Image (cartoon, rainbow, N blue to C red):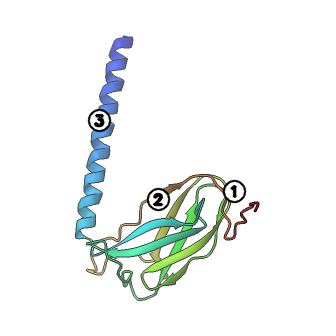
Amino acid sequence: MRRGLDELFEAVEELVEVVEGLVIALVALLRLRQATSAVLNIQGDPMASTAVLTFTDSSGNPTAPPKGDGSGLVVTFESDNAAVSIGIAVATGDTATAPITGTEAFMLSATVANTSGAPLLDDDGSTPFIQPQPISVAAGVAQAVTAVLSTE
């Protein structure tokens, strides 16, 4: 009986891997159709001190964000760790940034939305805008100014 359950469990794990692969392929296919995408990044050393979201075209070149429904766009950055706070996003051209405060590891995510709350579509008016993939940020020290101690 135990052997049968083990085989069933292995089969389910294999099925999950196949489904995950299909989801990844579907997202890639949708990205090919999408004229504008958003790439989430971090800036700062040794840990991210600024969250950065850049809009790119299908070739990966910086471009204007999607037009949306005309109500304006809002970018919201989030951390999955309450010990890490992310400030209000400021958008300029093809980039939105927000300051990060905290020293713990966290997952950084960003959402681009119409201010009206209506679903955000790509500029073709029919393709749903694909939100950027969250990224993992390692623990470290987030500060804008550092001091280096040395002797002469």
Residue at the spot x=67%, y=58% of the render? Answer: 141
> Marks 1 and 3, how far apart in space?
37 Å
The residue under label 1 is 83
Three-letter amino acid code of the residue under disc 2: Pro
- Whether tag 1 and tag 3 are in contact, CB under 8 A, the answer is no
The residue under label 3 is 15
- Give percent across and percent down for residue 102: 68, 60
| Mark 2, other Cα within 10 Å: few <14 / some 14–19 / many ≥20 | some
> Marks 2 and 1, how far apart in space?
18 Å
> Looking at this view, is 73 or 134 the one in front?
134
Q: Which picture quadrant has residue 126? A: bottom left
Front tag of 3 and 2: 2
| Mark 1, other Cα within 10 Å: few <14 / some 14–19 / many ≥20 | few
Residue 134 image label: 2
> Marks 3 and 2, how far apart in space?
25 Å
Three-letter amino acid code of the residue under disc 1: Ala
Q: Tell whether 38 sits left or right of 74.
A: left
Residue at the spot x=69%, y=70% of the render? Answer: 145
Q: For the residue labelled by badge 3, is the local secondary structure a helix, a strand or a loop?
A: helix
Q: Tell whether 105 sits left or right of 128.
A: right
